[in-house]
Amino acid sequence: MKLLSLLKSRSPLPPMVIGWAILTIIPALLLISGTKLFPLLSLNSLSAEALFWLTSSGTAPYGVATVLLILLLSYHRLSRAQFISLFLTISLGMFTTLGLNHYLKPFFSEARPNAVWLEQQYLLNTTNFYDHTKSERKAQMSATLERLEHAETELVLSPRIKQHWKSEVGFAFPSGHTLFAITLTMITSYYLLLAGNSVLPTILLIWSITMGFSRMLLGMHWAQDVLASTLLGGTIGLFSLFLTHKTFPFGHRGYIYLSGKLRGRRGALKY
């Protein structure tokens, strides 16, 4: 009965959970079926270029621009109290995802699909590769990709994707880009749905789905990386919302309370 009443209410949680389920099902089906998306796509095509620009929206420093753009688009769609709460929750969520991603990658030490594929072409040794420092791995990847151009393989990299492979030389698990996109989508969608706006949450949902696909198609991540990051990102988003609402008085009454406190301090300074 409680679940039925929640679904009938105007709470943003039911559509958020449904969206989260959709995001989770896609990589789960790929993992269960054993389907690998790399190297299915020609990485010298317009589609690959489009995926590169999409994945760049979650890559530093462009990821910061993505957050700022979403905040800007949300500013006129939310009340001031909701926007302040959105800003605090996104800050908490992004801090958590960065810390977790930084810890989990070396803990699991999973090789990326492109590195494994290069090893299958006898161009790279993943065991030795990941024993080096990041700068050394970049240099080794550059040398490997130079040899790839003369190897007997159908895979051809565009200049941008080639540079992307040279830069992304860390471990695979989890997918930091997917973690970033899911967390940001969950948090932002909550406040926008609460304000009665469903257009931007729908766009963010599509962006998150294509972000996961782009990471797999470009050879950066396995299906299990995207699946785990989707589950983690949704959990971090919900946790950040819960923690923010517990520590910050959310809503119109909270805004009145906060404004009153600020006015009281300004009045005290005058005297």
Image (cartoon, rainbow, N blue to C red):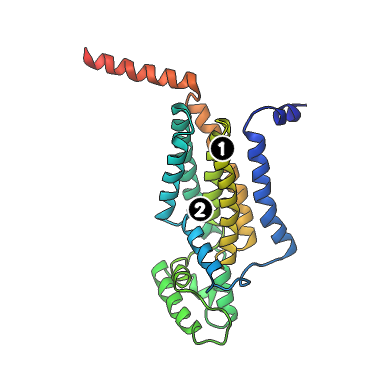
Q: Height in image: 184 above or below 157?
A: above
Check the image and name the residue furthest to the left: 271
Q: Position of residue 37 (x, y in %)?
A: 64, 67
- Assess disc 1: are there few (<14), some (14-19) or many (≥20) residues with their C-alpha within 10 Å of its C-alpha: some
Give the residue pinned by disc 1: 239
- Assess disc 2: are there few (<14), some (14-19) or many (≥20) residues with their C-alpha within 10 Å of its C-alpha: some
The Cα atoms of the two marked residues, 1 and 2, are separated by 16 Å
Q: Tag 1: residue type?
A: Phe
Residue 11 sits in quarter: top right
Q: Tag 2: residue type?
A: Asn
Residue 2 sits in quarter: top right
Q: Position of residue 212 (x, y in %)?
A: 59, 57
Residue under the point 68% across and 55% down: 26
The reply to whether residue 171 is in sight is no
Q: Position of residue 174 (x, y in %)?
A: 56, 56
The reply to whether residue 211 is in sight is yes
- Sequence-first tag of 1 and 2: 2
Q: Position of residue 187 (x, y in %)?
A: 54, 39
Q: Height in image: 213 above or below 69?
A: below
Q: Which label was assigned to residue 212?
A: none
Residue under the point 52% across and 27% down: 246
Q: Is residue 40 or residue 145 the one in the foreground?
A: 40
Q: Height in image: 121 above or below 2?
A: below
Q: Is residue 3 or residue 101 the one in the foreground?
A: 3
Element type where label 1 sits in the image: helix
Q: Which label was assigned to residue 101?
A: 2
Q: Height in image: 171 above or below 269?
A: below
Residue under the point 78% across and 26% down: 1
Element type where label 2 sits in the image: helix
Check the image and name the residue furthest to the top: 271
